[in-house]
Amino acid sequence: MTTIVQGLRRIPSWVLPLALGILLIAAPWLGISADTRRLLVLSCILALVTSGLSLSFGYAGELALGQTAMYATGAYLTGYLAMHWVNDLLLLVVVSAVAALVVGMISGIPGLRLGGWSLAMTSFFLVLLVPQIIDLLEKYTGGAVGLVGIPQPKLFGQPLSTVTFYVVVAVITVVWFTVMRNLVTSRHGIAFQVLRQSPVLASSLGISVFRLKLTAYALGAIPAGIAGALFAYVDKYLSPSTFGFTMAVTVLAAAILGGAKSVYGALIGALIMQYGPLRSTDFAQYAQVIYGVFLIVAGTLVANGLAGLANRAIKLLKARWDPQQPASAGGDPDQSAGESSGLTKRPVLPQLPGDRLQIEGLAKRFGGLQALGGVSLTAEPGQITALIGPNGSGKTTLLNMVCGYYRTDDGTIHIGDTDITGAKTHQVARAGVARTFQTPLFPEDISVHEAVAAGMYTPRYVGMLSSILRLPRYWRTVRADRAETTAVLRLVGVDHLADAEAASLPLGTRRLLEVARALVCRPKVLLLDEVASGLDEDEIERLAELIRAIRAAGTTVVLVEHNFKLVLELADTIRVLAQGELIASGTPAEIENHPRVLSDYLGVRQEGMQ
């Protein structure tokens, strides 16, 4: 059995989906009935609509129910054009996809700018307006009566039989899911997952949060428009009741039940919905109850739907029959980072020339609280500038202002000759500022290699079209990413974990991964926020050697740290904050014996002090 499992491991992940796709296309010649063929067509159409929600919600983390509106757009546009202008299925599929994309862009911008639940509410109201809009455009849509008289579909001027139409629908479905698979398994898919995990993390990697959210939502509109074009020809009649709230909930139920964070979860959910409740003649009466049960069961008991359940079952079987992990994973993820990879005491990095970070008169108030009161400091390239102070002294606030998370009330921030005062976070990152966080942030279900390579999304950008079509530029970038990520992971001592799940690793390893992710950005200024927090002595020692190597490479390092001993060992210059003001600045030897630092920061009372 172990041999079989090891053999299956060597089979590319795309082979099984491709085989099932070919089986779907060839179904009419496998003896299926006309009724089954119709159900498969409807399943493909529902899967297309659901895949758009999976892309925006499952991967990018933006709950939007507007796919139903794009679905209606594609359906009515196709029906009207087929009746009055041109009846060519492929042409109308393209037109409907473009029209749905436009509707998605227009409807998505207001909600995405407000953020959070605003997009869900905006798209929800859009769905509620669909029947009213159809009624208002009665001249083109048929109003409440519906659009009657849609002709038989044609392809290149030739009428399509029901079997040929089925094949076209199946081919379009397979092609779309291939496109989606290529997209979400590329760097863009990792960027979507980073966005879902934390918009703050995404922006710190140079990703424009609003642009990426809008891209995910707009791309999710395309398959809905395609599905609408196909649906217009199924019964050759369109009713406004088809595109109401019930349809929106159907799509949501299919996404959650199948697995929103899965390429093929939309297909699984659509098949269940078509072959389950939608076949019941009494379903309409109990639709909301049944959907409610589906959503509760799938959302609370089955994480990531049935697709997630299947993935976990496969992992358990592999662990049962092939307990020995592949060499690339390095065996035990809990193994010490330095033991397996042979991390040297003093890792050597290539040159990473930094720029001076210069802060002048930086001030920030939160209501009546003065978080920073005119702080000025400079951090030089090739040096470690430590920033210490008691809790609430303004250290993290200062870092957040440098990174653009907070707007300055007063003062300026320069990286070299570049003024980044008031710049957005992703613009600051692109100017050369990288940082770590007090709590390491990594999306679930992505490998160490993918998590670190996310840092190269902006510096080495590859377009979506190149990624979807797997053009030579995409493959060159994949090879370059793998080589650079492997080199950086080797430097930080965790290259043996390249294929392990990043989010599941111990805290100390994840902190090293954060530093690795920052290094692949090739930063001019590196901000380390409580990077040693929660580490044991051995992990702190390894981290200290890595920070020294970063300094030796020429990078400007700003270290915010409560471990005073570590600060004294590493820092070239120490700045001390208290109550939002800079109270001391000097070398480690000077700061170690500074009276006010001893009193305000370390709580040491000297003789003669009152």
Image (tube, rainbow, N blue to C red):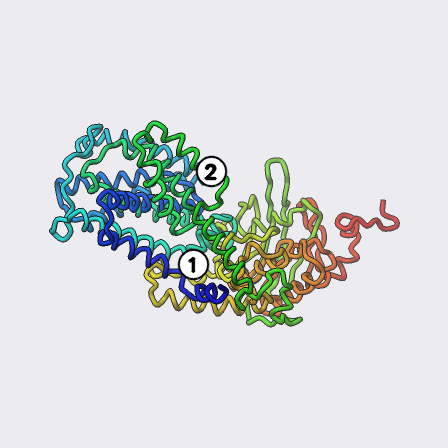
Q: Which residue is mark 1?
A: 187
Q: Nearer the viewer, residue 36 or 297?
A: 36
Estimate the x, y position of residue 59 in percent, counting from the top left: 43, 49
Task: Residue type at mark 1: give it.
Answer: Arg
Q: Are marks 2 and 1 in contact (CB under 8 Å)?
A: no
Q: Secondary structure at mark 1?
A: helix
Q: Nearer the viewer, residue 100 or 273?
A: 273
As drawn, 101 above or below 240:
below
The residue positioned 63% from the left and 43% from the top of the image is 371
Q: Is residue 416 visible?
A: no
Q: Quadrant of residue 349?
A: bottom right
Disc 2 from disc 1: Cα separation = 32 Å
The residue positioned 72% from the left and 53% from the top of the image is 584
Q: Which residue is mark 2?
A: 297
Q: Residues within 10 Å of mark 1 (few under 14, many from 20)?
A: many
Estimate the x, y position of residue 273 in percent, counting from the top left: 35, 40
Q: Is residue 9 visible?
A: yes
The mark closer to the camera, 2 or 1, is: 2
What number of labels is visible?
2
Q: Is residue 111 left or right of residue 405?
A: left
Q: Which mark is residue 499?
A: none
Estimate the x, y position of residue 39 in percent, counting from the top left: 27, 43
Q: Quadrant of residue 178?
A: bottom left
As drawn, 348 above or below 171:
below
Q: Quadrant of residue 131?
A: top left
Q: Secondary structure at mark 2?
A: helix
Q: Is residue 150 left or right of residue 322?
A: left
Estimate the x, y position of residue 539 in percent, counting from the top left: 67, 61
The residue positioned 34% from the left and 43% from the top of the image is 270
Task: Residue type at mark 2: give it.
Answer: Val
Mark toward the start of the polypeptide (2 vs 1): 1
